[in-house]
Amino acid sequence: MAWYSPARWIDRDQAASGSGSTPSSIGRIQTYLSGLAPPKYPLPVDPALAKSGEAVFATECASCHATGAARTGTVIPHDEVGTDRVRADAWTTAAATAYNAAFSGKGWAFASFTKTNGYVAPSLEGLWIRAPYLHNGSVPSLADLLSAPQQRPKQFWRGYDLFDSSAVGFVSSGADAERAGSLYDTALPGNGNGGHPFGTQLEPDRKRALLEYLKGL
């Protein structure tokens, strides 16, 4: 199972064009990363609870996030996912046209930029260690992601590497997190933690089961 799925590379051309990278060098890196296995969850997982959570995943998450699903790796419209739109809006149709015009006919392979109106839905291998969540890292744990957006932390400390096995994320509050991390304020432009309401209406026992299943991906 690929740890870095191709879906995570959708935006690579935009960044690569600015850094002087070439398609061949980017391709070699992608090939290497795609061959890595996801890190295994290092703590015990309740197999019965995880099995129950697998059924929840199938109904609540799989259509956009299961490996090989039709929508996995595709752009989900912003009107559907509802997460902070600053990053998507920063890349405009005019910018894509200008890039294409600048690179066209000059031997530079990155010359087919397009404007999209949403974010790519990635597959979830190694999800337990990929906190903080959403495209802008605005939600510190999976438990928070399954909470209603208005109940998610408004500020937290990002960068402390102590794992929180209960919430499934990294410890993001307290003196140690403050000392090791940097403050993330969801009120700042581009830092919003709203949207992605999927799974937030689940009953508590189904949320617990889903979290247990997600640990094993």
Image (spheres, helix red, strand yellow):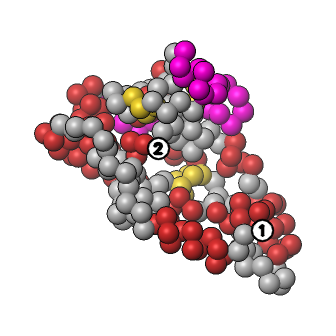
Residue 107 is one of the magenta-drawn residues:
no
Instruction: For label 2, count other residues whose C-alpha is less than 10 Å away and answer few (under 14), some (14-19) or many (20+).
Output: some
Q: Is residue 201 visible?
A: no
Residue type at numbered disc 1: Gly
Q: Is residue 205 visible?
A: yes
Secondary structure at badge 1 equals loop
Q: Is residue 146 left or right of residue 85?
A: left
Tell me the residue that label 2 is attached to.
130
Spot occupied by residue 194 in the image (x, y as percentages of width and height): 55, 32
Residue 198 or 135: which is nearer the viewer?
135
Q: Which range of residues does the magenta coloring cover?
A: 175-202
Residue type at numbered disc 2: Arg
Instruction: For label 1, count other residues whose C-alpha is less than 10 Å away and answer few (under 14), some (14-19) or many (20+).
Output: few
Which residue is most to the left? 48
Residue at the image point whose x is 21% and y is 46% from the top: 55
Spot occupied by residue 101 in the image (x, y as percentages of width and height): 84, 73
Q: Are marks 1 and 2 in contact (CB under 8 Å)?
A: no
Name the image quarter holding residue 107. Answer: bottom right
Residue 186 is one of the magenta-drawn residues:
yes
Tell me the residue that label 1 is attached to.
20
In terms of secondary structure, what is the magenta stretch mainly?
loop
Q: Is residue 135 left or right of residue 209?
A: right
